[in-house]
Structure formats: structure tokens, C-alpha cells
């Protein structure tokens, strides 16, 4: 009776949720734990969006919406992708889902089958390999090191592609490293892909707006890439709307149509209230984003300075998102005051949490055991206290 599908057995539970769970348990014991493990902005959803949701309630927008989303929203998204990202897409190619997570999962499910390989640059967002496995495909992780600013090189991509490669998943700005590919670097990857016309691309651009000094480019805007790229984006990170659940993708019609078909049998369209509320995001000026991104930049700089002053810790400068991924591998092999050896990122994070009350996520979960992920989506004072604790923890190792 309780035999589960092999699909479930092949999946890893989320490490981010596991560490957050342990941090919450310690808090319940009365410990003053600082959790830098969450992946959501600590800002309120902008007021015009909240007001539009109230209006949608008063208007009794309570019915099912069309499966791929309401026409006004798909139009607004297509227009955004055309004007801001230079993509040649129509509203009919846009599918709105319950978060970008669902968008990526459905894009993978629509094209991958057993025997296929999914190329995923590491460190990667934890869900990508699991989505590949869910589709019965094989994730192929390619390590981009801190020396390479955590970015895949064209040579690495060329080496990773085989006859079985079905899709490459790109994520810029990146969770967990904050790395942003320059337009030239993306072009370098596109040049390799032009030699391999059987490979599709999923470009997860959910952190598009959380960008510091870098230029942003959409992969599908590069020459020849539109016909094989699925662009994913959403409202969670840019508009601090994680709980509202709205993401979307735009892809060539053969692909977006398949995604819509899957969605029609799984969930139907996302929440009607959220869809109507999100229309207001397209009416807002850039000030809301500027304030949030300005705060993230200040925190990034402050935490980076503190981390780099710690002996044994190195970290490239991330140009986007709200994560740092310091390389702490120089500390591996040292011992805690209790005599336990720090063999890798899990030991390091366990030590910091248990001995110093600060929760980070081990890099192992993201496919790079050399580092740990620090989310700086919290206020500066808390971040500085966390840095004190991390520093004291590292100094305590011998
Ligand atoms: N893609 C990346 C890289 C993410 O970090 C996240 C959230 O953490 C998502 C997609 C999913 O976002 P949502 O489902 O909230 O739209």
C-alpha cells in the first residue's frame, strides 16, 4: 500500500527548507537565531498592487480564469517582453502559472523524457535537478567555480553537450550566487548553442530587476535563440509577492502550447485575484524597485566587506539577486572548539547554526560544496550581527 513512485524516491527534499526548519526549532527553544536562509524580499508588496487586489475582491473576480491567464495580463506581459527585453513574442505564447517554479517545472515536463540530459550550471537553484528527475530525465551539473565568478564558460558548455542533451537551464541573475552574465557572455554561450540545434534553453529571469551595476540581457533576444528559448519570469522577487503566486513563461508556440496543456490538467490558471492585482505592477513607476534595489545594494556591499575581512573566506562580487555565495573551502579540515572536523559545507553550516545561532544554506544543496549561501534579504543591523557571529565562528576554528 505505501509503495511510493520511483519519481518520489529519486527526489531530494529541499535543503533550504530543512535548514529553515532547524532554525525555527532552535528559536522555539528560546535561542536568538538569525536565519539568512530565506529566498524572499523583506519588503511589503507595493501599495498599488494591494489596492488592485482589494478592487478585484470588490468586483467579485471570483471565477476560474482562462487556463493560461486573463487576456489583459498576457497582453501586458507580452508587451513588457517586447519593449523591455526585445523579444518577439505575442500574448498567445504567454502562460501564467502559480509561480515561476511551476513555469519552469512545466517547461521541463513538456519537453523532457527518460534518456534526455538537462545541462544545469552549478551552483544552481535547488529545484532544477529535481524537476529534470521528475520528468525522468538526467540532470548534468557543470561546475562554475568562484574563480570564474560562478559563470559557465562556452568551453564548459561545449564539453557538456551530447546527443542526449535536451535543454540547458540558465539563471541570471543567479540564485544562489547573484552572478549576472554580461550580454557578451550570453552571446558566447549562444554561439556554442548555434552549433547544436537540438538543444533548447530555459532562461529563468526571475531576478531580472534585482540588478546592481550590470546590464541585463534576455537570452531569447540573441540571434537565433527565440525559436528555442523559453523565458521564465514572475512577480515574487521584483514586486515582493512571494505568497501571491504568480509566474509566467513565454516560449515558441509549440512549447508554450504544450505547457498550457499540462497546466490545464494539473492546476488550471493561477488565482484570479492575484492576476487582476498584478496588472497594477505594469502601471507603476520605477521608484518602488529603485528603493528596494538600493537597499539590497547597500547590504550587499556591507556584508561583502565583512566577509572578505575574514581569513579563509573569499567571495566574488555578485551583480544581482539578494544572495552571496562565499567560498569557505579553505576552512575545511579545521576543527570546532568541540573537536569536530569541518569536512564540508553541511558541517560548516551546522556548526554556525548550533554554536553561533546563524543559519546559512550549505553549498552542497546547490551543487557546489565549496561555498555557502547567504541571503541578505533582511535589515542591515541584523546582517551586521550575523557577520559578527560568522566571524567569531570562523575565528573559533582551529
Ligand atoms: N527561480 C529561481 C531561480 C528562484 O530562486 C525562485 C524562488 O526562489 C523561483 C524561480 C520561483 O519563484 P516563484 O515560484 O515564487 O515565482
Image (spheres, rainbow, N blue to C red):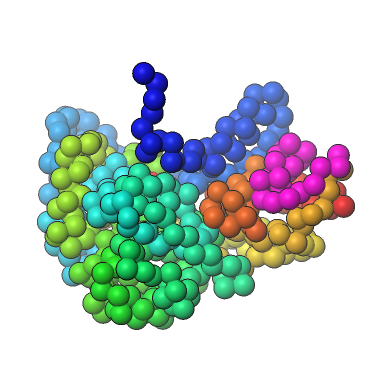
Q: In the displayed structure, does residue 280 sit left or right of residue 145?
A: left
* Residue drawn at x 36%, y 69% as measured from the top left: 162
The answer to whether one can see residue 104 in this image is no
Q: x, y (%) of residue 256? A: 18, 55
The extreme top residue here reads: 1
Q: In the displayed structure, does residue 392 sit left or right of residue 268?
A: right
Q: 143 or 273: which is nearer to us?
A: 143
Q: In the displayed structure, does residue 211 sit left or right of residue 219?
A: right
Quarter of the image where one finds residue 1: top left
Q: 292 or 192: which is nearer to us?
A: 192
What residue range appears in magenta?
338-358
The answer to whether one can see residue 231 in this image is yes
Quarter of the image where one finds residue 206: bottom left
Q: 22 or 86: which is nearer to us?
A: 22
* Residue drawn at x 60%, y 53% as measured from the top left: 363
How many marks on residues?
0
**Is 354 in the magenta?**
yes
Q: x, y (%) of residue 313? A: 73, 61
Q: x, y (%) of residue 115? A: 32, 55
Q: x, y (%) of residue 184? A: 41, 81
Image vertical order of residue 94 relative to residue 64, above or below:
below
Amino acid at each position: 500500500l505505501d509503495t511510493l513512485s520511483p519519481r518520489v524516491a529519486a527526489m531530494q527534499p529541499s535543503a533550504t527548507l530543512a535548514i529553515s526548519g532547524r532554525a525555527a526549532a532552535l528559536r522555539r527553544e528560546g535561542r536568538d537565531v538569525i536565519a539568512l536562509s530565506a529566498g524572499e524580499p523583506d519588503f511589503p508588496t507595493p501599495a498599488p498592487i494591494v489596492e488592485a487586489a482589494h478592487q478585484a475582491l470588490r468586483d467579485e473576480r471570483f471565477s476560474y480564469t482562462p487556463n493560461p491567464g486573463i487576456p489583459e495580463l498576457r497582453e501586458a506581459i507580452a508587451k513588457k517582453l517586447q519593449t523591455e527585453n526585445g523579444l518577439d513574442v505575442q500574448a498567445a505564447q504567454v502562460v501564467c502559472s502559480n509561480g515561476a517554479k511551476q513555469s519552469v517545472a512545466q517547461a521541463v515536463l513538456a519537453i523532457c523524457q527518460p534518456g534526455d540530459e538537462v545541462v544545469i550550471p552549478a551552483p544552481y537553484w535547488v529545484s532544477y535537478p529535481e524537476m529534470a528527475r521528475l520528468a525522468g530525465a538526467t540532470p548534468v551539473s557543470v561546475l562554475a567555480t568562484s574563480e570564474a565568478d560562478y559563470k559557465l564558460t562556452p568551453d564548459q558548455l561545449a564539453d557538456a553537450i551530447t546527443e542526449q542533451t535536451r535543454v540547458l537551464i540558465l539563471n541570471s541573475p543567479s540564485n544562489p550566487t547573484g552572478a549576472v552574465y554580461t550580454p557578451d557572455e550570453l552571446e558566447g554561450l549562444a554561439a556554442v548553442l548555434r552549433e547544436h540545434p537540438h538543444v533548447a534553453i530555459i532562461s529563468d529571469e526571475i531576478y531580472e530587476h534585482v540588478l546592481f551595476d550590470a546590464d541585463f540581457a534576455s537570452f531569447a533576444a540573441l540571434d537565433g535563440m527565440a525559436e528555442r528559448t523559453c523565458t521564465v519570469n514572475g512577480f515574487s522577487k521584483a514586486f515582493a509577492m512571494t505568497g501571491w503566486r504568480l509566474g509566467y513563461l513565454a516560449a515558441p508556440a509549440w512549447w508554450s502550447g504544450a505547457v498550457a496543456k499540462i497546466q490545464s490538467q494539473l492546476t488550471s490558471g493561477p488565482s484570479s485575484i492575484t492576476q487582476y492585482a498584478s496588472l497594477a505592477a505594469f502601471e507603476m513607476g520605477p521608484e518602488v524597485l529603485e528603493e528596494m534595489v538600493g537597499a539590497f545594494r547597500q547590504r550587499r556591499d556591507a556584508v561583502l566587506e565583512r566577509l572578505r575581512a575574514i581569513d579563509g573566506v573569499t567571495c566574488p562580487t555578485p551583480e544581482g539577486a539578494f544572495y552571496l555565495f562565499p567560498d569557505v573551502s579553505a576552512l575545511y579540515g579545521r576543527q570546532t572548539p568541540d573537536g569536530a572536523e569541518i569536512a564540508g559545507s553541511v558541517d560548516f553550516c551546522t556548526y554556525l547554526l548550533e554554536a553561533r545561532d546563524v543559519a546559512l544554506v550549505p553549498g552542497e544543496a546547490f551543487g557546489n560544496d565549496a561555498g555557502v549561501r547567504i541571503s541578505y534579504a533582511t535589515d542591515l543591523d541584523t546582517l551586521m550581527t550575523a557577520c559578527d557571529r560568522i566571524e567569531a565562528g570562523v575565528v573559533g576554528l582551529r
